[in-house]
Amino acid sequence: MLDLNFLSGSKKIVGLDIGSSSLKLAEVISTSNSYVLNKFYQIPLPKGIIVEGVLADARELSLRVKELFKDSGLRRRGIATSLSGNSVIIKKVTFTQMNEAELRDLIRDEGGKYLPFDNMDDVNYDFQILGDNEFNPNQMEVIIVAAKKDIVNGYLDALLDAGLNVLIMDVDSFALETMYEANYEYESNEIVIIVNIGASITNINVIKSGMSIFTRDFTLGGNSITEALQGKYRISFEEAEQKKIECLPDHPDHDQDDIIELQNSILDFAEPICSEIERSVDYFRSTFGGENIKHIFLSGGSARISGLAATLSQRLNIETEIINPFLKIGYNKKNIDAKELDSIRPIAAVAIGLGLRKMDDK
C-alpha cells in the first residue's frame, strides 16, 4: 500500500482532477522563469462512478482513466490527484508550540480529540503548521487533513489498475490554492475566497496572505441545477445539461433574446448554491472577526453560468469574478487551441493546481 502524505508534494508529475462528471488531465511544464500548460484533456464521467467525492465504481473509473491517457498521448504515469467532499476531513486546530515530529505523534495518539475518527490507524492524515496564534505566541495554528484509508485505497487501487503511479494525494481546495499562488499577486494579510462549483460538490477555500485559513465543502453543485431543469422541461438529464451549455456566453448558438427565460430559470435554480456560499462567508466573517474580504474567485463548470458572478457580488458585497489559471501560466499553442482557453479556464483550475505540484512541496 502506498503510504500517502496528503500535503507533500522533480516535476514530471501530471495533474489528474477526478470529478463526479468528468476527468481532467493537465501537464504543466516549468521553464526558466515561468510555467506552461503543455497538454490539457478532459472526458465526461457517467453519473454514479463518483458519488459525493467517494468512489463507487472502481472498475469503470480505471477504464475511463485509461481512455483519457490514451487520448492525450501522455507517457508520464506519475500523477498528483485529489480528494474532496465526504471523502476528506479538513480541520484547523490550535496547539501548544512543538516541533513537527512531536505534533505528528500527538495527532496519531490523540487524533480522536480533533477528528471524527475512533481509531487513527484507519486514517491517512497529514498537517501543515500555519504559524503562531495571533493572540498567544505560545500556541500555533495547524491545519489537519485526514481521510479513511479504505476510501483512499479505493482510489489508489483503481488508478494503479489504470497503470498510474499516484505520487501525491492532494485536496481540491489546496490544489486551487496552489493554482492561485502561481497566478496572482497578493499583499500581506490580504483575504480572498476561491469557490469551486463542481457537479456535485462545492469547495470553499478562504486564503489569507497566500495561505488557506478556512475550508468548507458542501454536497451541492451543478447537477442540482441540471436536475431542476430536467423536472421543469420534462427532459432527460443529458438534454438538461445541453440546455445549460446553450446558456453559456460563448456558445456558438447563443441568442440573448431566445434564451433569456432559460437563463433566469438557471439562476433561480442556482439559489440554493448561492445561499450556501453566503452562509459559509457569513460564518467565516463571524468566526474570524469580520475581517475584510478583498475578492471572490469562482471556478468549476457552473462558475460560467450567466449572471452568477454578478449575483454573488451583489449579495455578498464582494467583487466576484471567474478565476484565471492562465494569468501567468502560458500554454503550448501546438497542443492547445487559443479559442478553447476561455471555455476551459474555470474547469481546468484544479487540474492545473495539481499539475503544478512537486514532490518536495509542503
Image (tube, helix red, strand yellow):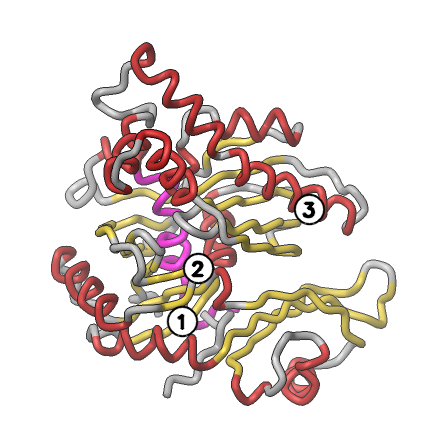
Classify 125 as above or below 14: below
Query: Which of the 4 image quarters holds residue 251?
Result: top left
Per the rendering, the mark at residue 206 is none
Classify 250 as above or below 106: above
Measured in 3D between alpha carbons, the distance from the residue under mark 2 to the one under mark 1, in whole angstroms, is 21 Å
Q: Which of 337 and 91 is in front in this view?
A: 91
Q: Are marks 2 and 3 in contact (CB under 8 Å)?
A: no
216 left or right, relative to 64:
right
Measured in 3D between alpha carbons, the distance from the residue under mark 3 to the one under mark 1, in whole angstroms, is 29 Å
Per the rendering, the mark at residue 188 is 3
Q: Residue drawn 31% across and 55% down?
A: 28
Query: Is any atom of residue 128 visible in this view?
Result: yes
Query: Is any atom of residue 327 visible in this view?
Result: no
65 left or right, relative to 125:
left
Q: What residue span does the magenta drawing correspond to?
A: 344-362
Q: Position of residue 89 (x, y in %)?
A: 57, 68
Measured in 3D between alpha carbons, the distance from the residue under mark 2 to the one under mark 3, in whole angstroms, is 35 Å
- Mark 3: amino acid: Ser
- Mark 2: amino acid: Glu
Per the rendering, the mark at residue 168 is 1
Q: Describe the element under mark 1 as helix, strand or loop.
A: strand
Indicate yes or no whether the magenta region holds residue 351.
yes
* Of the two numbered discs 2 and 3 in the rendering, the one whose residue sits closer to the viewer: 2
Q: Describe the element under mark 3 as helix, strand or loop.
A: loop
Q: Residue drawn 28% across and 42% down?
A: 237
Earlier-in-chain disc, 2 versus 1: 2
The residue indicated by pointer 2 is: 52
Q: Residue drawn 28% across and 27% down?
A: 246
55 left or right, relative to 104:
left
